[in-house]
Amino acid sequence: MDSLNNLDFKKLASQQKSIQMKMRLLALAHFKEGHSRTQIAKFLKVSRTSVNKWVQTFLEEGLEGLKEKPRTGRPAFLNAEQREQLSQYHQAPTLFSRAKPDRTSVEWVKTTLSRQSIFCGLR
C-alpha cells in the first residue's frame, strides 16, 4: 500500500487530467504537510467531509481508492421488448398518415411516441 510519506502528491497532482483527482491529491499534500482537515477544506474550497473522506480512503486503500469509480447511470425507461417494438415500428411504414412524414420532425416523433405508448401499454 502507498505510504503517506513516500509519495510526492503535488507532482502526482500536476500529472493528472482529472480535476477531481487533482483536488484529492492536493488535499493529501496539505495533509502530509501537517495542515488540519478544516484548513485544507477552506484552502481548497471544499467541504471538510470531502477532505475527511479522501484522507480516510487513501489511508485504507491507497491511490487506487481515490480514483473515480464507474457509475451505473439512470435505468432505461423502456425494457428490451419495448425497445425492440419501437425499433420495428420506426423501420416500418407509418400506419397513421396517408403521406410519408418526415420521421425526424419533432412533431412526428412526439405524436408517434404518444400513440405507441398507448399501444405498448405505457399509458
Image (cartoon, rainbow, N blue to C red):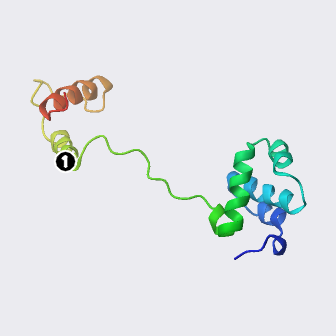
Residue at left offset 67%, top offset 67%: 60
Residue 49: image location, x then y, percent: 70, 46
Tell me the quarter of the picture where residue 11 sits: bottom right
Q: Nearer the viewer, residue 72 or 32?
A: 32
Residue at left offset 75%, top offset 45%: 48
- 73 in relation to 14, above or below: above
Residue 100: image location, x then y, percent: 16, 29
> Which quarter of the figure is the C terminus placed in?
top left
What is the three-letter code of the residue carrying label 1?
Glu
Q: Name the side, left or right, on which 99 lies relative to 77.
A: left
Tell me the quarter of the picture where residue 76 sits: top left
- 29 in relation to 120, above or below: below
Secondary element at tag 1: helix
Residue at left offset 85%, top offset 44%: 43
> Which quarter of the figure is the N terminus placed in?
bottom right
User: What is the total number of numbered labels drawn onto the structure image?
Assistant: 1
Q: Name the side, left or right, on which 35 lies relative to 110.
A: right
Residue at left offset 78%, top offset 61%: 13
Q: Which of 7 and 15 is in front in this view?
A: 7
Crowding at mark 1 (Cα within 10 Å: few <14, some 14-19, many 20+): few
Q: Nearer the viewer, residue 109 or 58?
A: 58
Residue matched to label 1: 84
Residue 73: image location, x then y, percent: 44, 48
